[in-house]
Amino acid sequence: MASTVEAPPVLPAPEPEVQPEPLAPWRNTRITRRAAVLGVLLLVVFAALFLRLWALQVLTGTKYVQQAQANSFRSVPVPAARGQILDRDGHPLVTNAPETAIQIWPSDLPRTRYPELRRLSQLTAVPLREIAHAIVRKRDDPLTPVTVRADANEHLVAYLAEHAAEFPGVTTGRAYIRHYPYQSLAAQLLGYVGAISPEELTTHRGYDMNDQIGQAGIEATYDRYLRGVDGTAKRRLDALGRARSGLQPTQQPKPGHTVRLTLSLSLQKAAEQALQDGIAFAHEDGQWAANGGAIVALDPNDGSILAMASSPTYKPSVYAGRVTTKTLAAQGLTPATAAGANYPSLNRATMATYPPGSTFKPVTALAAMQTHLVSPYSTLPCTGSYVSPDDRSHHPFQNWDPNVNQAMDMPTALAYSCDTYFYQLGNAFYELPGDRGQPLQEWAKTFGFGSPTGVDVGPEETGLVPTKAWRERRFSKAKDPCCWQVDQLWKPGNSIQLAIGQGDLLVTPLQMARFYALIANGGKLVTPHLLYDVENPNGTPVPTPALPSPKTVDVDPAALQVVKQGLWDGAHLTDGTSYPVFGKFPVSISGKTGTAEKIVTLPGYQGNKDQSWWCGYGPSEDAKLVVCAVIENGGHGGTAAAPAAAEVFAKFFNVKVQATVSKHSD
Amino acid sequence: MLEYAGSQRTGLQRNRDEGVALAGVLRSLDWLLVAGVAGLVAVGLWAISGVTRFDVTGNPDYYVKRQIVYVCVGVVALAIGLLLDPDLYRRLWRPIFFGTIGLIAIVLVVGRAARGSTRWIDVGFFTFQPSEFGKLLFVLAIAGFVAERARAAADPTTTLRTIGLGLVPILFVFAQPDLGTALVYAAALAAMLFVAGTPWRQLAALGSLVAIVIAFVLWIGPAAGVNVLHGYQKSRLTCFVHPQKCTVDARYNLEQSIAAVGSGEFHGRGPKNATQTRLNFLPEHGTDFVFASFAEQRGFVGASLLLALYLLVLWRGLRVVTVARDLYSAIVAGGIVVALLFQIFVNIGMTMGIAPITGIPLPFVSVGGSSMIANLAAMGILLAIHARGRVARSPRRSR
């Protein structure tokens, strides 16, 4: 190695190998001669390559073009069966029906494709325009077929098989479509599946344009568990695209996981029936406009949802197989028809907001006790109307029962649902000095109002807890040019209205159910949820993200006890607002009625309509179930919502429903 | 003693000429060779852009963009090779030799396995394939040894020693296992012996020996239960002779490749309609079978353009052998040119069924950074040898 270290070139090199060769090579004829030999080799090699290339491409090229065209082992996607959705006891709510799909391989269509496509359009009853559109959409993807319809009947399949020669480029393949054994049961909640849209493609990773994706409800939320992994198979096709061999699987599809919900099939059925009955009760009571509603039933201890009904509803099967605007419109699922059918796709439990009315009074009661505005067992007068001393307009706020004049403590005021009692609390909140903030609104927010509940079936409305800051934002010069200076002020009436759950306050039935769960479980704010567990098709559990643990709200247990007393009284004392429904119920139920005024726009009518509410739990001590029911435009809480809720309790506790006596109350 | 005096004198003169030589390099460039290389790189990028268009969904330029980066690095390597005096390599042949072996050995130790053979070292942003650079380094080193013993070129011991020395890196590469590259090294070794002036008789004896070894490895050995090659290697080597006897996999590749070349016909099918490539019937169409894919897409027109450019570069390369300033440079040029010729023939021949299937990349075309950079560096050295040979030959300095 030392020899390679170069000495300075000026000095003689120390070793002989630094010497150059004796002869300069351009005078070395031997090198020139050998280079010439290599040159000959070069020419021979290139002559061979050129000749071979010429022979292959020019002389016999046509043969290889045919070979390449016949060379059509084609990779075919094999759809994976989507996972089932079960109720908590394993009853299937959504399954798959295997179907035969009619597919087109656009690259195999003849050059004049119009006559063939038109015949196919007639046979499959799919408009030609739709087929053409689908082909254009998949222009950049020659390796997967375009599905014309996924639910071809056997006659059509047999016909196409017989006439295969007339339909080059048309094949059949396996497809799965969703099947709903209970039809419209829990429709908004389960959601549906559809072809992925270009927008979804950009926001969802790991999908391609041929995928189906959950579009709403559980199908969308848990798409990642349900979808499975498509497999591939290869099949030899001839130049016309006709199968020349069966499918040879190259990669087996992996079916999707089974998703089990906390929902109870029997309770869900009962809740949906109860909702219809509640609407019927309202009609009997003369509430002609009652036309929808929601019922939520959940376990107060962990927030698992056992039933979530929303009316009106639809049949999700219209989204399975071939989806047409016509079938969607018949169910009120297109923008043009939705209003006429009263928005059947809306999950009213999470997406509709209502003023809560008297069902909100426990919030006011708790906030007032926590703020030390009132002592629960000292009395306030319950009168026919109330005028705030701070109200310069001296507007009288009416009680629902104008003929009352009685001193009431808090449990009685809750049981009797005395508005004037709570007006006084509202006014006391108004009179608090500015540095005390707005404790009623703060407690309402602490109890989960005005923010999403975190339920796993989205989307969700947050509702609204009106505050001074909100009024200032809401009524600006630009949005309310005439009266913004007055409207943006927080006035006594705002506090008074809020105290009985009216005014600008808006809540979802689910938020309300969550709050009653908090009363029932002693102060824990649970996260409502529907996912029970996930299993792969072999029955092995699949890990799922843990639920957020219930948030313990720092509320005085004594204050909670007062409210629980009031709710028990409401159902058990003869003066209680839900006594006619729950007074003789075999299981002890506690709850609160609500009759909330809301300005509604109906066909041919615009004005105030009462929203019928009932929220409560049972058994009164150690509650197992919270139920919250709303009947839209249903009138009094005790006549529509309370009997509907009672049916759910009756199913849950497996007891007979008592004959209900209507009672008009707040 | 005379040689000493001579060496001293040329040494002095070289030193004085250094500046002149650098200045004269540009003037005495072989512009035809430069044009040939530039044309090859351009056609290569064109080929890659068509061949890999549908390989990465949504990103048709993925490979061609990477390849352009490699070309840029390669051009820098070419410039460095052009500016350095090749005599430097002669003086440093021993460290180069051991460096080459070390580099290849590293792969055996830490390299990662790819498709059953270990050829790559992952250095984060780039997987580095030392045996590609090894081709060039091997030529530079062995040429040093041969030039040192130029006077004893006719002595059989010299020939045997050269072969013994060359076999060390060859066996290392073979052990990777990378049979194709090992054969390229062997071809370069034979070419260097040939240019250095090894007598025909010895060459003939060597040729017979090689024939016997091949016969042993392929037929006699397996019959006697001695397997030097992996089954797949043997199958691929003999497939083009007996297509019916080889494994399904090897025959599939060969059939698809020939169909791809043939279906290109005169004008080519274009990237969109080249189903052999686009539908992935042709495996490895960005690397080993890139010629077949290119021929399918661009037809006889494109493929013969590529062949013509190769011919131009190799012809100019062989001319460099004859104008080289000294024997070392001539041997280096011979080694580089023959290694290139061998790769081109085996790669292209393999895609058309007239050469065995080995995993050799097609110089200047196949996707891959190491090969592109090493080949451009080799072209830089060829150009350097040519330029300095021209400078040495110019009348001013010839006595």
Image (cartoon, grey):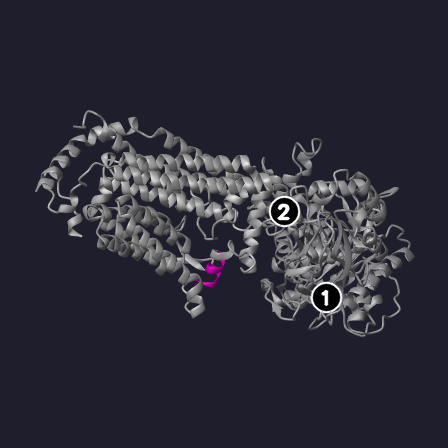
Same chain for marks 1 and 2? yes
Residue toward you, A155 or A361? A155
Q: Is residue A471 above or below residue B180?
A: above
Query: How many numbered tags mark residues here?
Result: 2
Is residue B352 in view? yes
Q: Which element is circle 1 on?
A: strand
Q: Position of residue A266 (x, y in %)?
A: 79, 68
Q: CA distance from mark 1 to mark 2?
A: 49 Å
What chain does badge 1 belong to?
A
Say which chain tag 2 marks.
A
The amino acid pointed to by label 2 is Ala
**Is residue A435 at least partly visible in the picture?**
no
Q: Is residue A394 left or right of residue B3?
A: right
Mark 2 packing: few (<14 Cα in 10 Å), some, or many (20+)?
many
Q: Which residues are magenta?
A: B229-236
Above or below, A555 against A77 in this view is below
Instruction: Determine the residue positioned at 23% across, 50% down.
Output: B95
Q: Are marks 1 and 2 in contact (CB under 8 Å)?
A: no
Main SS of residues in magenta: helix
Tell me which numbered mark, 1 or 2, is placed earlier along the sequence: 2
Which residue bears the numbered disc 2?
A68
- The residue singled out by tag 1 in the image is A86
